[in-house]
Amino acid sequence: MPSWEEFRPFIVTGLALGGVYSLSGVGLVVLYRATGVLNLAFGAVGAMGALIAWELINNANWPDGLAYLVCVVFGGVVTLLYGLLFGPPLAGRDPLVKATATLGLALILLGAMSWIWSDKARSMILPTSNENFMVSDVLVNYTQVIGFAFGVVVTVVTAAFLRYTNLGTAMRALANDREITATLGVPVRRVEAAAWLGSGLLAGVAGLLLSNLVGLDANTLTFLVISSLAAALIARLQSLTVTLAAGIVVGLVNALITPILSISEYRDMTPFILAIIALLWLSRHREVRIGRAAG
Amino acid sequence: MRIMLGRARSQFFVAIVLAVCFSLFIAACGDDDDGGGGGDGGAAQVKETVKASDCGPEPGQKASGEPIKLGALATKQPGTDFSEIPRMADAYFKCVNDNGGINGRPVEYVIEYEQTDPGQAASQAKKLVETEKVLGIVGNTSIIECDVNHKYYEAQEYFVIGSGIAPTCYSTPNFAAVNMGPRYSSDGATQALIRQDVKKIVLDQSNVPGTDYIEEGPRLITEDAGKEFEGLKENVPIQDANSAALKAVQAAGDGGGVVLNFTPPEALKILQAAQQQGLQDRVKWGCSTPCNTDFLAEALGDAWDGKLFVNAELNLITADAPDSNLYREVQKQYAPDIPLGSFSQMGFIEARIATEALQGVQGDYTKESVNEAFKNVKNFETDILCNPWYYGEAPLHIPNNVDRTVTPKGGTMVQEEDCFPISDVDPAIKEVRDIEKQDPSLVGGG
Amino acid sequence: MVIVALLAFVLAALPSMLSTYWITVFTAVAIYAVVALGLNLLMGRVGLVSLGQIAVLALGAWVAAKLLFDTSLPFPVVILLSGLITMVLGTIVGLPALRLTGLYLALITLMMAGAITVVLAATDFPNGGPGFLAHSESSLGSGATIRRPAVAETDPAYFRYVVVTAALMFLVALWHVRSKAGRAWEAIRQSEPAALAAGVNITLYKLWAFALASFMTGVAGALLAGNVGQLFNYQFPTRDNIILLAVVLMGGIYSIWGALVAGLLFRYLPALLDTWGLPADLLTILFGVGVLQVLLTAPAGIVEQFPKDMARLGRLVARGAGRVVGGVRRA
């Protein structure tokens, strides 16, 4: 068994990893709360945005800031387009169908990315990654802090937004029952569009941050969604706060297993095992149903 | 907007999606995606005394007549793309065809790709041999192909020249690689770090089949030098590079050394994580040959200048020497979209070896005569490799067993140590050196 | 009856008409058609989505490889055993998950697939080595490869063997669909509360569906093990779970023959594209578009849509021809 000294720095890396999982998890739950769609293409959208930004910076010599903006806007536009085209026709269907449709989008983006950008070592370092400070003799850089903080901010702001603003309430109603909401005179299409756009911009920002925190690699970023799903599932796709907390716990456990060499090989199972345990525990008394996205 | 019904709407969607994809594709093409990334700057300073037409025996004379068919099989899928190697070989063959061909005849080169599915890899090999009826196989580069197909090649009596990745590529009689492969390249990186006076060596590699085998060489070499050794594995793609880097550094301890054996994107993740945690000075860092790419040097930035000891199985792409100059010329004229780097170097050298071997064939070009010619290659001198290359008849082939060490500096890789032999404490290397001693003509002695 | 004729043709005539390359391609098609069949039954008959069938396939292949190396049981027995053991594993895994529905069930299967993938990366596949894991790490493994059935050593013979086994699986599926289980599944798919009210034991029949799908996938795993003689982790990437879902949807989930189309899409189409020199990435994009298309407009998939499309095309042609003929007559 490793000593406390050896464990300590992994708490820091665990929190950083937790920030990654929380960020993606929150992004997933936010859209689900607002539109009833679990966007499994969240990672792919962010990855493509990041790759486009990389392309602009390295091969077209655009200024960094402008390229980052393009990444975020790309995320917003692609997700909005998807939402406008495929949202309404699928609106009345089971959440499973809607989620499966986003898998279609993920496949399209994955294929496009691998076609356009071959597998090379790419790097796009935000300026904040080079500034750091010491926490119990582990260096923490500002991008990790931003990633973490961003997850927290999005959680708090979105929760407040959904509860206290008119638009937010309209979104919750929409996710709950589209037909009734429409008959109540809510401009359904516009509200939906706002939700998709917001979620897309979030995916773009997440893509930028994750390309720093995890790596600028289409495959990794797209399938990171699966590990992040764990945090969202533990929160039953409902509570943003629980998603945030779950993401941190998953990250911490994952990192803390690293120095325990006998099981270190299996540490990547952490998100999956925790999600399975949580889901089975939560469903022990009653059947768990994903139907309406409760407010 | 009037709601479109079912069919029309879906077609509209499909059209939109395809339009988006297509426009992105065009945009990317226009931006010259990762072409000319690293090497052009260096090439401009080199005296261009070599012309591309030097690739063939009769400059300017187009080959005609019945083509000599050769084939290749490479892995090409999202996350792993070795297609540059056979494509560069193809470029060389095109050059040869434009300049006299092989005894006047052109080369026809068939490239097949597989996506790491063994059934597919086996099928493609059968397609090359039985459907396309290729006379020889040059340029194979695949994660699984050596494992899946080596018995087939032995049965069909093909002697393959390629780039090896799996351990099987270095332990069968019918495959000879121009590169070193993960184990012997990690050996070289280990040796480089031992020369840096480290107290302990940690080998960290991607958790793909073959790790124990790859670990054996560096372990023996490290223990023979009286140092401690530890082997670690990471599942790829790596999601938590911070912990991975930390784990490796902790295992090595202060004054230790870490040798990485990963593909460039994964190695980059670990190196960047190490740098961001300020770990690049706590231990010495080494890397097997996949790290030897200017892409990586550029991505790492100057924080790593002179701090990463990369085993280089091939010479620098900027070297000023006949074959290297020819390589850059052929690339410029026949394959400008393939970046300069070790992949295209390998494709170039494999095609060159095959061409030279084929030029020497007397009589008909058949499967037998072509493969006999490949098998009889000996003392093939080239400045791209440290030692002359050879094939020969032997139970295993590791003809590239003398290497350099390079290190990143100012966005490119520069030479740190000149050619040194890989230690024969590794039993496979010892076996190969014994073979070379028994027949010194293989490497130009005797 | 068309099916029987087709089967006869495939078994008798096809191997001699095709090169070895295409025979091996169609062997893979048949194997993955069985995998698709499992998912097809789950999705089409019972309305359950599993995103972990490829991981189950890996399990089945592991079991088969272990049995083939460590015992000298005849191949058919190994196939049966792999199917049964995988069925048991699948049922154990499915049991607690049955309290979940719809999206949750799909996601938990994805989580399980992820977990299995990590374990397999650590244990690797049997290659004739020692111990329970039967894995040897020396450069050539143990030098042994997974054996094929004694009667089917060559590629064309193995192709026929695989096709016969696949046909048997399809028969099993057909029988199930027409049986009491099939009716119960239909009731569950239409409306669980109503089925419950009608006295259908929902848990039992859902479990049965999982068991059947796992059994079939286990059988396919055994066939896969014998295909190339070696197994690699690379054969079972996470991405394939999603692509399998895509092709099963595109093939059509309301008819079991959709599974055959799915198998063709999964293994024949890539070979075709490769022959035409097109990149494999195009296929990923195509499958993504296919998923969207199916979910939006043709939930019945190609199997039902294609005949409808052909019929429509036929009507269009007939109308056009009629007009031409009429015009000619008038002239």
Image (tube, coloured by chain):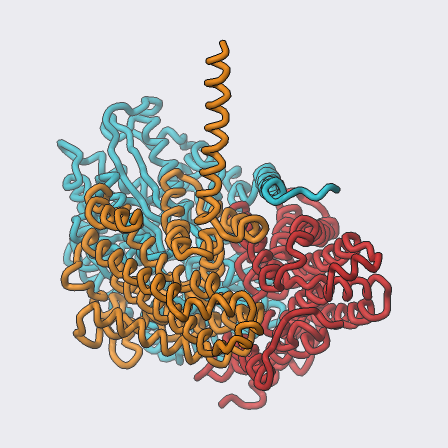
Chain colours: A red, B cyan, C orange
Question: On the picture, is A49 further left or further right than A65?
Answer: left
Relative to C266, is C149 above or below? Answer: below
Question: On the picture, is B72 further left or further right than A129?
Answer: left
Relative to C311, is A98 above or below? Answer: below
Question: On the picture, is C32 further left or further right than C24?
Answer: right
Q: Is residue B125 visible?
A: no
Residue C320 % position (x, y): 49, 24
Quadrant of residue B231 within the rendered picture = bottom left
Residue C44 % position (x, y): 47, 61
Residue, far top = C331
Q: Residue at x 40, y 42 (%)?
A: C273
Please name whichever residue, B110 or B373, is drawn nearer the observer in this view of the structure. B110
Relative to B79, is C137 above or below? Answer: below
| Quadrant where the N terminus of chain B is found in the figure | top right
Residue B322 % position (x, y): 38, 39
Q: Residue at x 37, y 43 (%)?
A: C272
Residue B306 % position (x, y): 53, 61
Q: Residue at x 27, y 39 (%)?
A: B70
Quadrant of residue B219 within the rendered picture = bottom left
